[in-house]
Image (spheres, rainbow, N blue to C red):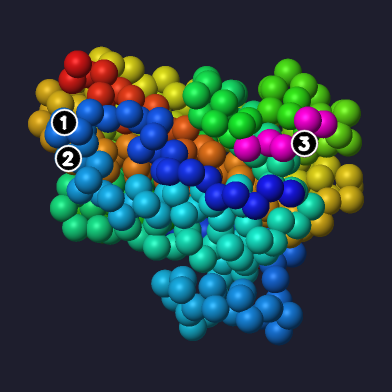
Amino acid sequence: MSDVIRKFTRTVPDWRPRVAPIRLEDATPEQLEALQVTPSNTKISAYVLTLAHDVETLKVRSPLFNGIMYDKGGLSREERELGALAASMVNHCIYCAAVHAGRHAQIAKDTSVTDELFAKGTKAELSPRDRAIFDFAHALSQTPSEASAEQMSALRDAGLDEAEILDLILSASLFGWANRLMHVLGDPVRKGGA
Amino acid sequence: MSSETLTGNTLVDLSDIAAGSPVAAAMEGRANIIALSGTTEEAVLKPQETGAWSHDVRAALAARIAALNGETALADRYCALIADAGIADLADPLSSGKGQGLETVCDFMDKVAVQTRDVDARDIRSLQEAGISDADIVRLCEINAFMAYQVRVLAGIRLMKEGRA
C-alpha cells in the first residue's frame, strides 16, 4: 500500500495494525485495568489496544520498558536511545526508529548523530563512544547475536563502566522485543492518511 | 496442563555470575529489571489465559527460538517444561510443525525470530487464513518478542563476563 513508509525518518508516523485491536467497549475488567498502567491513558493508541489481546503480558511489560529506558543511574538516556535505535535499524522497524531517533535528538539537542545514521547506516561517522555503543547494539540485534569480545572491549575502551554496559544490553535487547511487536503487527503510515 | 511456576530467575540462573564480581554488582544495580524480566517470562510462558497456545506449546516455541539463537542451555530449560511428548519436537528448529498442525505457526515464528526485517502484512494474513484469531496472533508475537529480549540479554551478559575473565 502506497501510504506505508519504508525509509527511516525522525517524523513519527501513524501505526496501522494488521490485526483488529480490542474495542474499549468490549474490554474485560482485566484489560481495562492493564490499559490504565500505560503511560498515556487519555487516548489509548491502536498499538496498546492491539497488545491488550495479551493482557497478562501487557500488564508487566510497561514497568519493565520504563525501567530499562528511564531508571536513574547507569547509561545516559541519550545512549539508551542509541541502543534502541541500533536494534530498530537492524530490524527495519520504521516506527520505533522514528520515535527513538527523535528522542535521541531531543535529549542530545542535536540531530547530527541520527541524521548521519539514517543517511549512512553502519558507515555513519560517529564519535568513538557512540561508535562503540552503536556497533555493539547493532551486532547484538542480529539473529543469532553477532556481538563479539572485541566489541565488548571497545565499550570498555570508550569508557563505559559495567553498569552502563548492562544498560546498553538491556535497551538494545528491549528493542529486539518492541520491534517484533511494532514491525510485525502493523504498518508505519503517513500521519493523517488512511 | 502443568501448573508449576518457573523455578528461580532464568537470567540469574543461566548467567551464572560469580558473587562479588563487577558484573554481579551491575546486575544487582538493576535487580528490579532482572526481577521484572522473570515476571514477564512467567506471563508469556505460563499465562492463565493461554488462548490457543498451551503452556507446553509456548515452552516448545520458546525453546525453538532459543535454539535458533544458539542458546542451548536456555532451550534445554524450556524443553524441560514440556509435559506432552507429542509437543516436544516443536522445540527443534528442524521440525516443520506439521505433526502438530502448526506448520504455519512455526514458519511465522521462525521468520519473526530470524528475518524480522522481512516480515510484512502477508505473514500476518497467512496466519489469519489458517484460522488463527487476532488475539492468538498477538500472543505468538509476544512469545517471540520476549524471547528476542531474553536471548540477547543472556548473550550480552555472557560477553561482559568473558571479557573480564
Mark 1: few/some/many CA within 10 Å (<14, 14-19, 20+): few
| Location of residue B70 with respect to A84 vertically, above or below | above
Is there a contact, CB below 8 Å, between mark 2 and mark 1? yes
| Chain on which label 2 sits | B
Looking at the rendered structure, which numbered label has been put on residue B25?
2
Residue A69 image point, x, y percent? 32, 54
Residue A82 image point, x, y percent? 30, 42
Q: Amino acid at mark 2?
A: Ala
Please tell me which residue is depicted at 33% across the width and 25% down the height of the picture: B158
Is there a contact, CB below 8 Å, between mark 3 and mark 2? no
Q: Is residue A176 left or right of residue B81?
A: left
Q: Which residues are magenta?
A: B81-86
What residue does disc 3 label? B84
Please tell me which residue is depicted at 74% across the width and 49% down the height of the picture: B1
| Location of residue B26 with respect to A35 vertically, above or below | above
Q: Amino acid at mark 3?
A: Asp
Q: CA distance from mark 1 to mark 3?
A: 40 Å
What residue does disc 1 label? B21
Q: Is residue B78 visible?
A: yes
Any magenta on residue A57? Answer: no
The kind of secondary structure the magenta stretch mainly shows is loop
Please tell me which residue is depicted at 19% across the width and 58% down the height of the picture: A72
Residue A191 image point, x, y percent? 56, 64
| Location of residue A122 with respect to A37 vertically, above or below | above
Mark 3: few/some/many CA within 10 Å (<14, 14-19, 20+): few
Q: Earlier in the sequence, mark 1 or mark 3?
A: 1
